[in-house]
Each structure stands twice: as structure tokens, then as C-alpha cells.
Image: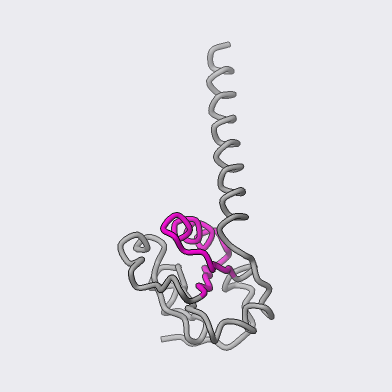
């Protein structure tokens, strides 16, 4: 009986965390289709939040690599007065990055729907 209660409590905590993340994502960022992303990305900072080896394997032309694992230390490299276009491989890490930036006062945050794996525009590889 006790193990059921513990399992239920853990499940409720996880559910609460997911709801919190969903609300924060909705508040923090706007998800853009590839077409909308392309329309505005020349006037924005494009940040690839994947790890350097992923970035080196191919990235959106003009993007800077600031991995989500280094974002707290490198936030100063991102301007608050210019829109920030975020992407990762599939959208999970860019969600976390957007919430992190939102908590630090960034407000013009946008994310590429589907991430880099869905991107059909211009790319560059090292």
C-alpha cells in the first residue's frame, strides 16, 4: 500500500513538472514554422543550442553555437534588444533554453518548429 502511495506522489510530481514546463514554454516563446523562421531570421540572433559536435556536423547558415549546457555562463553573448531564434535537433533543448532565457529577462524568443532535423533551408557544415 505504501509503495502505491509513493508511486502516486512521484507521478503527481512529474505531472506537475510537465504542466509547469508547458505553461512556461507557452509564456516564454513563440514556435515558428520554417517559413516564418526564414522570414525573420535575418533580423534576429540565431542560436543553435546543440552541442559543438552536432553543430559542426551541420547547422543553419548564420547560426551561432551556444549549447544549452553552457547557456547560463554565456547568456551575456546574447542581446536582449534583438529577437532570439533558437533551435536544436528536435525542440527539447531549445525549450529548456527559452525558459532559461525568459527567466533572465529575454522576451523576444522564437523556436524553430521541429528543430534542425526538419530544416530544409540553407545549411553549413565544418
Query: From which residue to which does the magenta span run?
Result: 83-111
- What residue do we see at 67% from left, 78% from top? 36
Relative side of 80 to 11, left or right: left
Q: Position of residue 113 (x, y in %)?
A: 64, 68
Q: Position of residue 100 (x, y in %)?
A: 44, 56
- What residue do we see at 45% from left, 68% from top? 50
Q: Is residue 94 above or below residue 45?
A: above
Q: Nearer the viewer, residue 93 or 71?
A: 71
Q: Residue furthest front?
A: 81
Q: Is residue 103 above or below residue 63?
A: above
Number of numbered discs = 0
Q: Position of residue 13 (x, y in %)?
A: 54, 32
- What residue do we see at 56% from left, 47% from top? 21
Residue 103 part of the magenta-drawn span: yes
Q: How is the image coloured?
A: one colour
Q: Residue furthest left?
A: 73
Q: Nearer the viewer, residue 94 or 5?
A: 94
Picture quarter with the N terminus:
top right
Picture quarter with the C terminus:
bottom left
Q: Position of residue 35 (x, y in %)?
A: 69, 80
- What residue do we see at 32% from left, 67% from top? 74
Q: Nearer the viewer, residue 95 or 116?
A: 95
Q: Is residue 18 above or below residue 70?
A: above
Residue 101 part of the magenta-drawn span: yes
Amino acid at each position: 500500500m505504501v509503495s502505491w502511495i509513493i508511486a502516486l506522489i512521484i507521478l503527481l510530481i512529474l505531472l506537475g513538472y510537465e504542466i509547469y514546463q508547458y505553461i512556461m514554454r507557452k509564456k516564454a516563446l513563440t514556435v515558428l514554422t520554417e517559413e516564418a523562421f526564414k522570414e525573420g531570421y535575418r533580423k534576429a540572433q540565431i542560436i543553435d543550442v546543440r552541442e559543438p559536435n552536432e553543430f559542426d556536423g551541420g547547422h543553419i547558415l548564420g547560426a551561432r553555437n551556444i549549447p544549452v549546457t553552457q547557456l547560463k555562463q554565456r547568456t551575456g553573448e546574447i542581446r536582449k534588444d534583438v529577437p532570439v531564434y533558437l533551435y536544436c535537433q528536435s525542440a527539447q533543448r531549445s525549450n529548456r533554453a527559452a525558459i532559461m532565457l525568459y527567466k533572465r529577462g529575454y522576451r523576444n524568443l522564437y523556436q524553430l518548429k521541429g528543430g534542425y532535423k526538419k530544416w530544409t533551408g540553407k545549411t553549413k557544415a565544418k
